[in-house]
Image (spheres, rainbow, N blue to C red):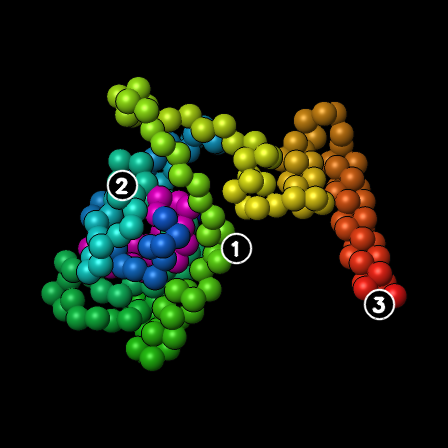
Amino acid sequence: MKTKLKVGDVVLIKQGGYGFKWDDVGKYVEVVEHGEYRDVLRDVNTAGVRIIPYDTQLETEKPGINNVVGLESFGVCPVVKLNTLEDDNTEQWDNRTLGADEEYVAVSPPEMEEEVERVIQDYGKHYRYSFRLNLSEEDIANGFVMVKVDPYRVSTVYNLGGWQEHLVKKTLRGTGKGHTEIELIEELQCTIDRAREMYYESLEKDDA
């Protein structure tokens, strides 16, 4: 993911999960340095930025890896409030378009305020799930803890059951048992079709 973010930019957090908790969406941070972090899932170095809080304390105690967060945190088109290193660092309420030249695209304050409010209200409501894991002295000494993430953990955290849990299990397993992708899709569709049947069966029973 490319970025036109500059050192000194004060930028709006639009998305959690890339170095920030979801509770920090709608807050501003300042970019202090460009950097990289190791994406262990893809086994590649990924571009990011090192940040510090701007005017509000963050819920995320240690953002990102070595304080480097993913560029996805700020969306495809970051909302840049101002740049602390520029001579005229008054609030610009600008929206810098990625891939364009190093120019700001002017956005009036009322319009940007509406955008900020929308981000705060709409951000990942269906992703706001978490679970607390107590750390042992050994975990603290190691500096990390291994958490087994499987369909049952996911379903428990999201409070899923029945056909929804079945879908999660099949989706996460993927083609691991030798199924082709189209066979997997057909299996998932069968589960959804049966869930629809059960829904209408329940309605018929209630009407009887």
Using the image, determine if residue 105 lies above or below residue 75.
below
Q: Where is residue 72? Give x, y as percent.
A: 41, 50
For the stretch drawn in magenta, what is the main secondary structure?
loop
Q: Residue at x 36, y 68 (%)?
A: 116
Q: Is residue 204 visible?
A: yes
Q: Which quadrant holds the C terminus?
A: bottom right
Element under disc 3 = helix
Q: Which residue is mark 2?
A: 62
Residue interval drawn in magenta: 2-20
Mark 2 to mark 1 CA distance (whole Å): 24 Å
Mark 2 to mark 3 CA distance (whole Å): 54 Å
Q: Is residue 99 visible?
A: no
**Badge 3 or badge 1: first in the primary sequence:** 1
Q: Nearer the viewer, residue 174 or 86?
A: 174
**Badge 2 or badge 1: first in the primary sequence:** 2
Q: Nearer the viewer, residue 76 or 197?
A: 197
Q: Is residue 14 magenta?
A: yes
Q: Residue at x 65, y 44 (%)?
A: 161
Instruction: Give the numbered dot on residue 207.
Output: 3
Asked if the residue under mark 1 is in contact with the one under mark 3, i.e. CB atoms within 8 Å, the reply is no
